[in-house]
Image: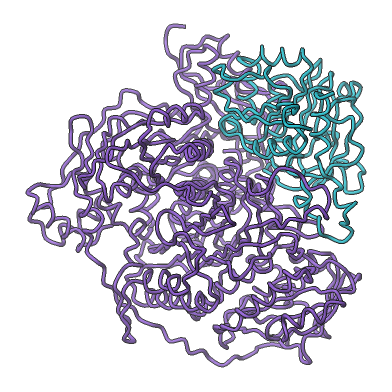
Chain colours: A purple, B cyan
Amino acid sequence: MDSVQDVAVVLGPGRAPVGPEAPAGKAALFGIAADRIVEYRLVHLRGRLDDGQIESLAQNLLVDRVGQWWMRREEHLPPTRLGRAAVVETGLRPGVTDREGAELVRSAREQGLDLESATIGRRWFIYGPLRPDQIETIANRVLHNEVIERWALDELAPAHTDPSAEAPATGHIPVAGLGRDELAAISTNRRLGLSADEMVAIRDWFEASNREPTDAELETLAQTWSEHCSHKTFRAYITTDDGHEIDGLLKTFLRGATDKIDVDWIESAFVDNAGIVHFDETHDLALKAETHNHPSALEPFGGANTGVGGVVRDILGVSAKPIAITDVLCFGPQDLDPAELPDGVLHPRRIRSGVIAGIGDYGNKIGVPTVAGAIIHDPSYTTTPLVFAGCIGLLPRGSNPTDAKAGDAIVVLGGRVGRDGVGGATFSSQSMNTSTADVAGSAVQIGDPVVEKGLIDVVLEAREQGLYTAITDCGAGGLSSAVGEMAEVLGATVDLALVPRKYPGLAPWETWLSEAQERMVVATDQPEELLALARRWQVEATTIGRFTGDGHLVVVDGDEIVVDLPTSFLHDGRPRLYLDATMAKTDRPQRVETAELDGNAALKALLAHPSIRSNEAVVRTFDHEVQGGTVVRPYDGINGDGPADGTVVVPQGTVSPVPAVTNDEVATPIRGVAIGIGSAILVGRLDPEAMAWAAVDEAIRNAVVAGADPDRISLLDNFAWGSPNDPVALGGLVAACQGCHDAALAHRAPFVSGKDSLFNEFVDADGQRDPVTPTLIITAVGIVPNIKSIPAVGLMEAGNDVWLIGPDAGALGGSYFDETMGGDHGGPPPQPDASAADRHRGVHAAIAAGIVQSAHDISDGGLATAAAEWAYAGRLGMTLAVAEHHSTDVLFGEGPGRYLVEIAPGHTDALLELLPDARRIGWTTEEQRLRIGTTLDLSLDEIGAAFNPVPGDDEDDERANL
Amino acid sequence: MSQNTRPTVLIPIAPGTNRNQELADAFQAAGAEPRQVPLSALREGDASITDHQLLALPGGFSYGDSLGAGRLLGLDLRSWMADQLQHALDREMPIIGICNGFQALVHAGLLPGGDADAALTDNARGRFECRWVHLAPQSTGSVWTNDLNEQLWCPVAHGEGRFVAGDADLLESNNQVAFRYAEADGSPAGGTYPFNPNGSKGDVAGVVDPSGLVLGMMPHPEDHVRIHQNPHWKRRGATASSAGIGGCLALFESGVAAVVG
């Protein structure tokens, strides 16, 4: 075969899932009744292949011998016996990561086939008597996402990249002599996200330097100075309307609390990519939690996927081995009427299924267990869904090198640079509107977890061999921020001509800025050895420059100078932000109960609330067992379907592989890492400061129930807020930070890292702003001194006593009870309670003493909800009498430092010695009923029907095999 | 067993492989000396299968599961690794493939082997599934399962684990089914979710080749070789004698015993 030709082949059998989350089910959301939607895989081949070679390629590389077939596309037509069908094809846009296509080319060439390029798409048969506009709606809203994909009726042209594309040259952006408005217009037009003040500072610097900025310099400054990279709001000087001056939220409240708590087990906090704390005598833990909201709103799978990839690289960026992933996901109502969706917004169901698939895909493929998380549903998350991804790593103490020297080579490891992911940091730092999806598409990427798995292997082995002197990850801002950060002190020179690219045609500034995932940058004085190691692991590695020591960041593209900035201006030249905050009044109306309490109905409603009910089916799509160290699972208990408060992993490599065959042989204490997560968005609507206290308390409670020592708990903060330019929103942020500070001090649990995400708001076509519900997520990571004493998830044994730790009643303001009863009925939200810290310590002491058989914290939905989950998890009943009057606040109120613990009757004295205020409120029973006084009486079957209606079933299968 | 008499087990690592460390730990605990080697080192001749006494293909997502789980690693096995593998089989080397390793062995044609054909395809429920499953060992005369008298309990974690045999009767008559998914009491899962997590026909969780040397299984026995990995290790009845129920160390010990004689 002499000439290059294009061939498209279809792989079968097709998939035609049914149910509300299948494509046909999603079409029904838009009022379109498709009889059946069948999905086939479509492979575009371009090369010099004759018929026999195509046959061989398909048989060897594309289909199984059993149960699969292939055919040329022109032969693949809908059978007429099933009625009329339309044909739609979807495929990735050119330049979007297409690992399957790349692997196909590699494998075919190894087999001696002359395959030039290959891309993989999908071919859909849509059956039913549908109008063309309905087919279009299905294609647009159900089958593809325009941010990364294209579609066409019948046949889609393949997206082979053009090998002859010309690269644009570096341009200059004149700023000299321009006024504020003109400068602001440049920022807006290029989507730089720079304020007029910042543009003025840039203009002044270049005027003083007697030249105009290049496009790459302006983009570099925009990335480096973005909210995402520089946290300018958290570093801003804030004046509140009640007369307070705050010299930076981060410094005053978060790092401020850590400094005051001053413990000796923190190695580093709020520097580098992740916080580092002691694990045992010889190992440290690296902790980080990130947000990835904007990308997930536009391309849920890719956004969540790269969110996980990014936070794992943060951990790798301090030379730690990733050992656990967390995820907290916030979605709009799954039953939202599509007619209510603003233009440019994906349906919450689509966002949810895509995000869940994206999280699982990444964690599963890099071999790191996804062990902890939460899913919160609220109408305000419809336009601004939130994705928080966290990662924990393990490293030998002192093994993260941070001493790059002048003359060290700069080596980039991992994925090639492409046009996807250009401008991620600036995009993530701005509000979204109806056209964001169109203009910011290139900021969103698809991850390639296999490359990241390779990075983990290379970096950890390179660390062992001492092959690098400093390391950081390429996150938002790509090479510009990675090299820029590393060169902050030394200065560096980089030649973009050396940077490996996915395809030709990238402008120099695009190469420099592209965030394309799965890359690390290291400084090394042994580049040859490092490159050889990378080859061994089949990870691409290239030397692209060196550290100079002259304090200048110089980027060239061959002979052309692209960037030449002093690092002092890059990192310290941004004018400080000054902001005003309005502190909202938190006076609350008196509570008014509207109806007689029906305990059974109220509990069932709570258990079925989308933010409370079981997420087991979601969690089962995440590999939470890999690395073999998960000892408290997210769903645990006698049948593996009871929700655990906190989860625990024993880091791989910290126990010897000699097995302990029996219980008695676990004589030496085995340490674990407990992870707890806290949030309280309903409280936050009423009182952001109280939200912070509640979230910190819940996170700590969860970790304590999982066995953590409260004196060894580190905290991570994640804020997702609206625009800080709104003084009221900023006032809420100030109050929440104050609450974080005070709660951290009260519990003596220091913050070690965090991440804020601002501008989470959607501006609709009429200019109406829809900010996200202010959301604070606290992750508590604690040390479990001995996993043997961790209480079980779910009741263990009939005839044991049930004890309540903490007050009988909780608060109903901002409670899930009010949420399920139609809204706010007044009354205060849970108030800050420093005494809860004593209860955490008492509960831990009881756990450490080995007398707590099982435990559950009282959180969303109050005591009755906690009791129901606890009983269900152990498939045992409970009879409780909490107080003489089983009032609403006793059964369903929420508040800090409250626990239920199961204790054998013989351990009463031991418990009271450690927790003198504990109250015995009932006992466990063989009979599978939950009884609370005369107010509440439900069987576990009824509880299960509300909490876990279709065990193991869920709808989140979208693109699981992307 | 002293260190120098430990048989070596080769654990190749393809791009995207994971659970290699657990597999190494399990073999270490079973008395072998694991050697984890990147595929590139095998390809360039820095190491060879035949320098070892056992071969173990770990789980994960080799090559990102592009073009189907295990397909491209299977292609490696039957192209540039084929000669080494044949030598190994001629020398009666026990080989185990777990999850992705099983998928690769099937794609390579080593499993089920003989005249039988099979595939591992999308789970019946169409999504990845991570949960603990009970496995009933079947009597196959394989070096891997000969000594297994009790059920195993360990997690599955896969999206493409539904076993489909070209000729199920042939596999049965050849005695090649090594493990079936079961309920907690050992009775057959009968295709019922979640006991059979992926819809495999005949509840097949693992198969051996006609020689019994090559075992492939979807579940992860390497994730249950220590008592504290057992989700019920502290529940009522988890006494010193019974808490070990379901532990999978014996499987690895069987393979190791086969080569130390």
Q: Quadrant of residue B50?
A: top right
Looking at the picture, does residue A841 appear above or below residue A783?
below
Looking at the picture, does residue A299 appear above or below residue A98?
below
Location of the C terminus of chain A (image quadrant): top right
The residue shown at (77%, 47%) is: B226
A547 relative position to B91: left or right: left
Q: Is residue A123 visible?
A: no
A647 relative position to A904: left or right: left
Residue A188: % across, % down? 25, 55
Q: Nearer the viewer, residue A90 or A210?
A: A210
Residue A887: % across, % down? 72, 88
B196 relative position to A60: left or right: right
Residue A638: % across, % down? 82, 59
Q: Nearer the viewer, residue A584 or A691?
A: A691
Q: Quadrant of residue B213?
A: top right
Looking at the picture, does residue B199 appear above or below residue A879?
above
The residue shown at (65%, 29%) is: B35
Looking at the picture, does residue A236 appear above or below residue A538?
below
Residue B217: % across, % down? 77, 33
Q: Nearer the viewer, residue A724 or B240?
A: B240
Q: Is residue B114 visible?
A: yes
Task: Count every numbered label the image shows and give the total.
Answer: 0
The residue shown at (17%, 57%) is: A183
A745 relative position to A488: left or right: right
Q: Residue furthest top?
A: A2
